[in-house]
Amino acid sequence: MKNLAIVAACSLLAACATPTPRSLSAHTVDSGVARSPDQLALDFEKADLSLRVEPKTRSIRGDALLTFGTRQQVDRIELDLGRNLPIEAIEVDGQAIGKDRWNNPDGRLKITLPQRLEPGQRVTVRVRYSGTPHVAKNAPWDGGFVWSQTPSGEPWVASAVQGEGCDLFWPCIDHPTGKPKQVDQHITVPAPLVAAGNGVALGMDEKDGWRTWHWRAKNPSTYGISINVGPYKLMEGSYASRFGNTIPLRFWYLPQSEKGAGELFAEFPTMLEFFERTIGPYPFGDEKMGVVETPHKGMEHQTINAYGNKYAKSQYGYDELLQHELAHEWFGNQLTNADWDDMWLHEGLGTYMQPLYMQYLRGQREYFAELMAQRANIRNKAPIVSGKSRTEGQVYSVERGGPGQDIYTKGALVMHTLRGVMGDDAFFRTVRESVYGRPDPRPGNFQPRLGTTKEFMEIAKRVSGRDLDWFFQAYLYQAALPELVATRSGNTLALAWKLEKDTPFPMPVEVLVGQRVVTVPMTDGRGSVEVAADAHYVLDPNSKLLRREEQIERFQQYREEQRKKRQAGG
Ligand SMILES: [Zn+2]
């Protein structure tokens, strides 16, 4: 609090040397701000992170050894690190550099190199820092560090920084394209606590009442790198993959959760089997399928998925939260959006995996029931893709013109509809190529990759041999859903598609007339079908199409009014 006046004055003067401000800058709070030219010049080869986590003081002490390659001449290294984590010292290639050579006024850490770096050269930067990391207001949605306690009063700590980014606790390039090729973690915690990490376990050292847990992960997504500390017990197993490899299964859970944890652990193999059959190989089979029980709801941390669903049961008979987070190993961690504007690739495909899992396990009733629940939440306030570079915050905020939750629900229903248009074979080939960058993924023949909406559309067109621009234009780049206008006169039912931007929409429509299903081609967006004057008809009786439905709009309006009434009533 006492730095507040100084902070306000300094924000007007770019370079004033004062105590480090404690509040986060707008730059740190958001994730995916376009990389500066200095950042674009860097290849992030390795991050070696030593992090001491002190639950008592809710603070961390970090020592980050970062190795970069470069393709251009570089005089300056620019990284992202929240200014509430004051830097104590910086070294470049093992040599300490003066405080005049770096500054971090607004969360953009700029380090002037002692020597220019030529293309092809490498540099290692060491950043030592400490402080109290940003505390999550409502993790994982409004993220940061979660300092919690287990039911028996022991420390239970987690990070969840998808919305805000890696710069909330370590110096990184906070952009989806800023993935390091390798991240080593050395997490030091009070004994006997356990720090469950990303990738492969490299052992634990104990000294003076502190334990250091060592981990190594290849190509982790930036927000997929996480801290998870608690008095965990570990469940272990292995999964014999249909691709010939054996995948270690690991679940760190609280001692109080033995029963629920056992039941959840028993679901791991079925979930893996579904994803491997439907999409392709589990992307990190040489590391592990890892899950850790967290004090927040959940997050797709690579190979150490955060699980906080409290072992809830539903009528569907599986844990939707874990299945959703696990889907992100394919859609998020293996296939990472190159820009947050493409985030529906993570969330739309990830959300479609829940109804699809139900269809795989149980059939049509559960598939359509889950799709219906998702359909009721589509808001259509903004297109799910803008076509421009966006930050994570811009995508999530409906107030700022973003699609918000539609990247989940509308994304899922768009995938359901696309599948109907393309047929299963072409649809799943498209998804597979988008995820792995090749049609024939096998363990060892692919790497995590970056993908875009544009690329997804191109793959779909190539694989199906059809022009699908009309489809993607309508569903991804327009806010309103296509509306099917049906007009009955005499013995004829006339059909016409009506679109927000009046773009072509040759989407065939099935109509059930009496006992018979008639397919109307709608080649130019119009068509008609004979319906006798006293016959009953149903549009799209097999629920293939995502389209405007007034009864859902009325329901949403009613639900909103009820919500306001409840709020007003306290
Ligand atoms: Zn998700």
Image (spheres, rainbow, N blue to C red):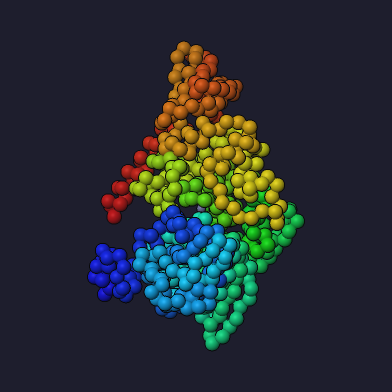
Visible residue check, residue 230 = no
Residue 37, given in percent of the width and then of the height, sits at: 45, 57
Residue at the image position 63 percent from the left and 76 percent from the top: 203
Residue 292, given in percent of the width and then of the height, sits at: 56, 66
Residue at the image position 50 percent from the left and 27 percent from the top: 505
For residue 179, above or below residue 344: below
Residue at the image position 52 percent from the left and 59 percent from the top: 72
User: Quarter-wise, where is residue 181 in the image?
Assistant: bottom right
Q: Is residue 440 left or right of residue 73?
A: right
Report the label total.
0
For residue 409, above or below residue 526: below
**Which one is in front, 13 or 515?**
13
Quadrant containing the N terminus is bottom left
Quadrant containing the C terminus is bottom left
Q: Is residue 29 left or right of residue 237?
A: left
Residue at the image position 53 percent from the left and 17 percent from the top: 529
Residue 240, given in percent of the width and then of the height, sits at: 73, 58
For residue 259, above or below residue 506: below
**Which one is in front, 532 or 280?**
280
Q: What is the residue that sits farthest to the right in this orientation? A: 244
**Which one is in front, 268 or 172?**
172
Residue 59, given in percent of the width and then of the height, sits at: 42, 75
**Which one is in front, 377 or 564?**
377
User: Quarter-wise, where is residue 9 in the image?
Assistant: bottom left
Q: What is the residue that sits farthest to the bottom in this orientation? A: 208
Visible residue check, residue 288 = yes
